[in-house]
Amino acid sequence: MKIIIVGAGEVGYNIAHRLAAEDKNVIVIDKKPDAIRRISEDLDVEVVTASGSNPEVLIDAGIRGADILLAVTDSDETNLAACLMADLISPTTRKLARIRTSEFDPYHSRLKDQCPHIDTIINPETEVVRTIKKLMDAPKAVDIGDFVEGQVKYAGIRIERTSALTGMKLIDFPLKFPDERPLIAAIIRNNEVIVPRGTDRLKSGDLIYFVCEAGELDKMLELFGKKSRPAQSALIVGGGRTGEHLGQILENNNIKTRIIESDIDRCRHLARKMNNSVILHGDGSDQKLFIEENAGSSDVVVAVTNDDETNILVCLLAKNMGVKNIIARITRSSYFPLLATLGIDKVVSPRLSAVSSILHNVRKGKILSDISISGEQGEFIEAIALETSDITDRPLKKISFPKGSILVCVVRHGKIIIPSGNSVVKPGDRIIMFAVRKAVKKLEKLLTVKLDFF
């Protein structure tokens, strides 16, 4: 498979890294020499220093023989122009474009149906807002998401020192939860991702990820002592695209919302757009303003400015004022390992959202989704088992999976099955697997051969 990536920023870099590891033929185009130099030094891909919207550059890069064009620069206009040129030169090439500006939203269907015929439009900000809303609905969860069109949920929760589960071996879970219990897919301890075995014990401070049926999520959270009510009031720091979109959703859900924005013109824009939200002009990281506005009374504080450091400082201020539910928008992955030590567990990343969306749409065949957790240290992979697979028609305890991987869920004819060692995967089943980062390549190589979903 030949893939041309226009844009060598964080999203382009990470997509190129992932696809190159899968032995795809990848070409990256960007007019910024420093960005291209970073990719050429780190990755085994072809690079071109030029504008990806230039038709001659696309032709020289081999667009006529390319299976997919990914337009993921920071400029929506450049991405649209690249797709337009690709459509004129090579109509059969699939086109995926990163488009973030809300003004383009009403035209998405026409951009797909008419020239430039973009197959998939990706808006990472939209995915970030959806994730924030999910975290607000389950405030005791550190991370949350779904598979199988929402039928299966995964959640990450922190084990507290006072929890009855602290010190318990996983093999003892059937005694503690004799009827229904979640399957623990991963334990994150001291920034290390562990695929657990029955003899592993839960420790205070562990971040554990479990999988369950969507309708059982609240019950499972309660079993872990994490029952809580959804947020009724919110303080949003940052009135950019993300803050505005989130504020509109919260208004529609009758959640009392305040937005702090430092740009006065942006404040005026928000005042015109919002109906019931309170718009405040000021520096969201100013402790005096936090005290004056009684930020500690908010059920949740969400920091979504365009500056990572400001978002971290806002969350620390909110935590110091007693806010239990704090959510930070973080772009730089190098910050991820530090945040948990600061007590900032809930982090949303536009970059990771974009990478997951693109991988979901790029992969052919039977890989249905690919979701990274903990700063890409581990991944959930959703796929379909085929009749030719060695994973089918045998008890799982007789199948050798790569070290650091686990099958966490099977969906058969709409029924959710949390597997045991005696469970058997049937052809056509949807399977959800988890793997630590170092095991992903081996797992994907195994699945490529055995499940044939590329």
Image (cartoon, rainbow, N blue to C red):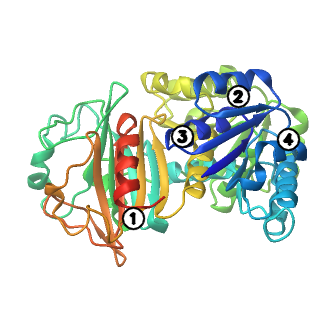
Pointer 1 residue: 214
Pointer 4 residue: 57
Q: Are marks 2 and 4 in contact (CB under 8 Å)?
A: no
11 to 334, vertically: above or below: below
Label 2 and label 4: CA atoms lie apart by: 44 Å
Pointer 3 residue: 18
Three-letter amino acid code of the residue under disc 4: Val
Question: Which residue is depicted at the point 20% across and 49% down?
Answer: 400
Q: Residue 210: x percent and y percent?
A: 32, 50
Three-letter amino acid code of the residue under disc 3: Arg
Q: Earlier in the sequence, mark 2 or mark 4?
A: 4
Q: Earlier in the sequence, mark 1 or mark 4?
A: 4
Q: Earlier in the sequence, mark 2 or mark 1?
A: 1
Label 1 and label 4: CA atoms lie apart by: 47 Å
Three-letter amino acid code of the residue under disc 1: Ala
Label 2 and label 1: CA atoms lie apart by: 36 Å
What numbered label is drawn on residue 49?
A: none
Pointer 2 residue: 284
Three-letter amino acid code of the residue under disc 2: Gly
Is residue 431 in view? yes
Q: Nearer the viewer, mark 3 or mark 4?
A: 4
Is residue 298 in view? no
Q: Residue 121: x percent and y percent?
A: 72, 57
- Tell me if 242 is positioned left or right of 205 in this view: right
Q: Mark 4: which secondary structure?
A: helix
Q: Residue 44: x percent and y percent?
A: 58, 31
Which of 171/53 is in front?
A: 53
Question: Which residue is depicted at the point 11% across and 39% down?
Answer: 199
- Tell me if 449 is positioned left or right of 59 in this view: left
Q: Are marks 1 and 4 in contact (CB under 8 Å)?
A: no
